[in-house]
Amino acid sequence: MDLGTKKFEELIEAIKNGHYVKIDTLILGMSRKKDNPKEFDRLSVNGYLFYKSIKDIPKEIIKDELDKVKKKFSLISEGCSLFKNFAAITGVDYYLVLDVQTAGITICAEIEGQYQTFI
């Protein structure tokens, strides 16, 4: 996906300022530092599952679904070296989230390179 350098610059600035942005089907933002929640830390990439409830999600698919989120983000970031460098500098955490319309429930994540499941 090629959004153009100017668009990526705008997205990076919005993300740095604490906004979440949607690119394709992913939502990107910055996670807050654990020791100082007023400061931002790492880039967070959220991908979504659409099931009626947690019990409907086949547990054997969640790792594969998170891998799809990672792959999609990689393809997007290949579109601009500035954005790819931004992600490399901040580090990236990936989240697979169940969309329940009024909220999101994290199903699994890769945080600082460590895979975790929450269901």
Image (cartoon, rainbow, N blue to C red):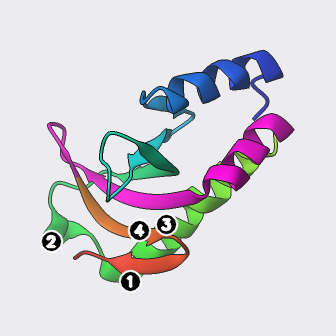
Is the residue under label 4 in contact with that under label 3 (CB below 8 Å)?
Answer: yes
Residue under pointer 4: 109
What is the quadrant of residue 6 in the picture? top right
* CA gap, disc 1 and disc 2: 12 Å
* CA gap, disc 3 and disc 1: 12 Å
Helix, strand or loop at mark 2? helix
Compared with 109, 119 (above or below) is below
Q: Position of residue 102 (x, y in %)?
A: 14, 37
Is the residue under label 2 in contact with that under label 1 (CB below 8 Å)?
Answer: no
Residue at screen point 17% across, 42% down: 103
Question: Which disc number belongs to residue 55?
Answer: 2
Question: Which disc number belongs to residue 60?
Answer: 1
* CA gap, disc 3 and disc 4: 7 Å
Q: Position of residue 4 (x, y in %)?
A: 80, 21
Is the residue under label 4 in contact with that under label 1 (CB below 8 Å)?
Answer: no
**Image: magenta residue range:** 81-104
* CA gap, disc 4 and disc 2: 18 Å
Helix, strand or loop at mark 4? strand
Residue 94 part of the magenta-drawn span:
yes
Q: Residue furthest bottom?
A: 60
Compared with 4, 116 (above or below) is below
Residue under pointer 3: 66
